[in-house]
Amino acid sequence: MKKKYIAVLGCFVALLSCEKGSIKPIDPTVVSYHKDIEPIIEAHCIQCHSIGSSSVELYDYEHIAEIVETGQLAGCLLGDTNFAQMPMDHVLDDSTKNVVYLWINQGFQDN
């Protein structure tokens, strides 16, 4: 019994000794095109939508912003029947879609 108390006390002391503020939480409300969106496009879209593609080109911010403005990007990710589901070979997980939606809702800044 005494060993359990010593173990609990040791854990408590270890937790108290952790420096507050040394870990900065990620702010999920700020989405960056270059940090968050560009890697998603590169991983899931660019193989079919690169420079010279016969379909929509998504190789830079300007082209992506044009597709956002038309509603096509959100429509493709949402599975809207007016748009083809993208990517065609797999479905993006909800957390990835949410990052894209958040970026769009924040005004799809080139940041």
Image: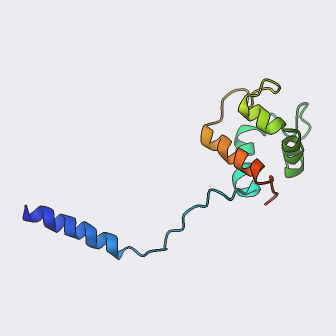
What residue lies at 80% left-to-right and 52% top-to-bottom? 108
On the image, the x and y values in percent for residue 36 come to: 69, 53
On the image, the x and y values in percent for residue 8 come to: 20, 64
Above or below, 6 relative to 79: below
Number of numbered discs visible in the structure rendering: 0
On the image, the x and y values in percent for residue 53 come to: 89, 34
To which quarter of the image does residue 45 belong? top right
Q: Please name whichever residue, 93 or 75, is drawn nearer the observer in this view of the structure.
A: 75
Q: Is residue 47 visible?
A: no
Above or below, 55 relative to 7: above
To which quarter of the image does residue 101 belong? top right
On the rendered image, what quadrant is the N terminus found in?
bottom left
Q: Residue furthest left?
A: 1
Q: Residue furthest top?
A: 81
What residue lies at 84% left-to-right and 35% top-to-bottom? 72
What residue lies at 15% left-to-right and 68% top-to-bottom? 6
Above or below, 43 relative to 88: below
On the image, the x and y values in percent for residue 74 come to: 77, 38
What residue lies at 68% left-to-right and 59% top-to-bottom? 30
On the rendered image, what quadrant is the C terminus found in?
bottom right
Q: Please name whichever residue, 46 or 67, is drawn nearer the observer in this view of the structure.
A: 67
